[in-house]
Image (cartoon, rainbow, N blue to C red):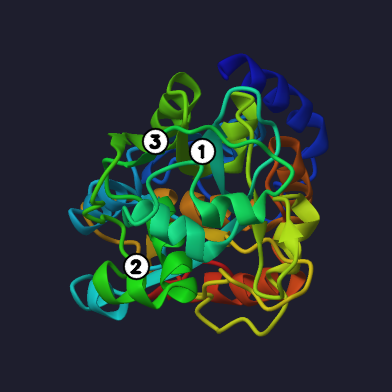
Amino acid sequence: MKKNHLVLSLVAVSVLSSACGGHPKQESTVSLSGAGATFPEPFYSMAFDTYSTQTSNTVSYGGIGSGGGVRNLKDEIVDFVGSDAFLSDEDMSEMKPVIHIPTCMGAVVLGYNLPGISELRLSGEVIADIYAGVITRWDDVRIMALNPLTRLPEKDIVPIHRSDGSGTTFVFTHYLSQVSEAWKTKYGASKSVDFPRGQAAKGNPGVAGLVSQTPYSIGYIGSEYALVQNIPMATLQNASGKFVEPTLNAISAAAKGDIPSDTRTMITNSPERDAYPISCFTWLIVYQEQNYADRSEDQAKAMVGLLKYMLSNSTQQSAHLVKYAPLPKSMVEISLENLKKITYNGKQILE
């Protein structure tokens, strides 16, 4: 995986060479640090490396899960958090005002390990019942009905889920809550869920690794991680009844519609005919007032510069290199306006 990211980073240097214009002026090079979601980490690894090459500022990022990243921001020990789940009103009531800046779009996929089977169709209701422990066998009549031409094994299903607080888990369970009333009532949507059965692993890399090593397993993971480990991904039935693969076009189709001014929105179970049903945005979240925990004004300017860089056309168009989809134009425009709300000592940073 490191080799893959190194090659992509080298390619991205030329692709993103024009992306750094227009940064707020700063007096010296600085270091920025963030933590959070593993879901967008391949894209961040590429983009942050290229940003550092262009500006001499350094950006370190720890993929510890969205839950851990949010705790670090609350404790004011990082400059930003990466999260696939926007902060709730309750979360924000416990913090200083924050700004959500979306960075790209991706898909949560159902990777599976079924020896000899390379195609699998699933519906949202079936997935919910697998993770709720209602469906426990691959030869269950409901799975066979979705796959009439496939000889499914007479084996127990091994569901794999996250052990850490995770935005990926939130996206996945948000989807399940929309397609299954039973799931919504008993488990709901959350970064951490008490799954009734299966095995747990930390981060998207951990879930992908466990699925690849465990015959007859299934796990929800970011699509890039399934691709890197060559894990087959199920084709899912969307809200219009169409079976859709997690292509970049299908992910982008899910983003059609109005975007709220704070960009906090979910696009799971989109009604669009060609949309992949577990598509999502992912965000970098920062404090609106950047003077906290002895941070310098140069750090604040560099943070705004990084956010503007992530929204630039060159950076957005590079997302496909690591199998993410660019943001819709309307979301970029709203986000660029939101950058103007970020201040240092009450003074607007981006003019």
Work out whether mark 1 precedes mark 3 in sequence or the reverse, and give the earlier one: 1
Classify residue 201 by image quadrant.
top left
Within 10 Å of the Cα at label 1, are there few (<14), some (14-19), or many (20+) other Cα atoms? many
Classify residue 330 by image quadrant.
bottom right
Q: Amino acid at mark 1?
A: Glu
Residue shown at 23% from the left, 46% from the top: 77
Work out whether mark 3 precedes mark 2 in sequence or the reverse, and give the earlier one: 3
Classify residue 123 by image quadrant.
bottom right
Residue shown at 73% from the left, 59% from the top: 243
Task: Give the residue at mark 3.
Answer: 156
- Residue 2 horizontal/vertical position (percent): 56, 17
- Residue 155 horizontal/vertical position (percent): 44, 32
Closer to the eye: label 3 or 2 = 3
Task: Give the residue at mark 1.
Answer: 41
Considering the numbered disc 3 on the image, is that residue within a helix, a strand or a loop? Answer: loop
Residue shown at 70% from the left, 38% from the top: 119
Distance CA(mark 1)–CA(mark 3): 32 Å
